[in-house]
Amino acid sequence: MGPDAVLHFPTRFAVGFQLDLPNMPMLGASSFGHPGAGGALGFADREFNVGFGYVQNQQGGFAAESRTGALLKALRRCLQQRSG
């Protein structure tokens, strides 16, 4: 783990994949993937056996946006219903 020269916050990588961090919008410690510009996000999670990909056709700012967060919240609800 260390500071990312482009994103200006700590990141963690393993064999080409970015690993989960507290400030990253993934599911948890078993998630790996990478965010992109404007809220795009792609990752997989071994614990939940799920993959997630989201890209938008109009780019906003570089940071994650509300649509990405809303989709992740819906994914978490679905996974909780599936396991519970």
Image (cartoon, rainbow, N blue to C red):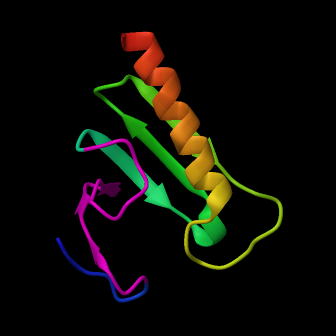
Q: Quadrant of residue 45?
A: top left
Residue 36 percent across, percent down from the top left: 56, 65
Which residue sits at x=45%, y=22%?
Answer: 79
Residue 38 percent across, percent down from the top left: 65, 70
**Residue 76, placed above or below residue 38:** above
Residue 84 percent across, percent down from the top left: 36, 10
- The residue positioned farthest toward the right in the image shown: 57
Which residue sits at x=52%, y=49%?
Answer: 42
**Residue 38, placed above or below residue 9:** above
What's drawn in magenta, residue-wise? 7-28
Which residue sits at x=61%, y=53%?
Answer: 68
In the displayed structure image, the side of residue 45 where residue 78 appears, left or right: right
Which residue sits at x=56%, y=53%?
Answer: 69
Residue 1 belongs to magenta span = no
Q: Quadrant of residue 82?
A: top left
* Secondary structure mostly seen in the magenta stretch: loop
